Amino acid sequence: MNVNGYTHIHKSTITFIKITKRGIKIMEKKQDYFRVPITMPSNMVSFLENLGIECKKSGGHKVANTEIVRTLIKLLMDLDVDLSGIKSEEELESRLKDAARRYK
């Protein structure tokens, strides 16, 4: 993903390991996170909730909406998305789908 001129706030990330009965979990301290308010239609919120619940139903744990969104952002960071000349959300969606098809 080429993001020329993109600036961001960077805080040093402190990770720690939590050992549970189910295994090892690497975690970051929450104080290193920033709250980012986003708006979306109710059907997208329902989709996120159901996705997290489906993880639990299939034998795992419920995954929080914020964990799902963070994971999707990590995926976006790995994609090679052509961002040139995008003028709408629909065009961005199309470019993201193209990049996802090429992702290996």
Image (cartoon, rainbow, N blue to C red):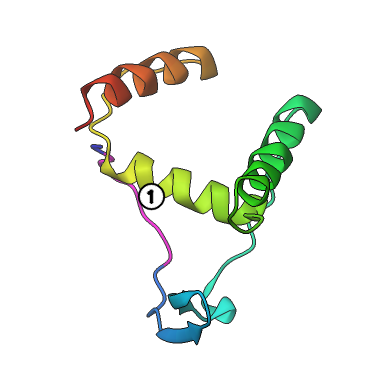
Residue at 58%, 56% in the rendered image = 60
Q: What residue is shown with label 1?
A: 74
Residue at 23%, 32% in the rendered image = 80
Residue 45 at what x, y percent from top left? 74, 36
Q: Is residue 4 magenta?
A: yes
Q: Is residue 10 left or right of residue 48?
A: left
The image quadrant that residue 86 belongs to is top left
Q: Is residue 6 left or right of residue 50?
A: left
Residue 56 at what x, y percent from top left? 66, 51
1 or 28, nearer to the observer: 28
Segment colored magenta: 3-9
- Judging from the image, what secondary structure is the residue with disc 1 in? helix
Q: Is residue 48 left or right of residue 10?
A: right
- Tell me: residue 3, above or below residue 83: below
Residue 41 at what x, y percent from top left? 76, 27
Query: Quick one: label 1, few (<14), some, or many (20+) residues within 10 Å?
Result: few
Determine the main secondary structure of the stretch shown in magenta: loop
Residue at 27%, 43% in the rendered image = 78
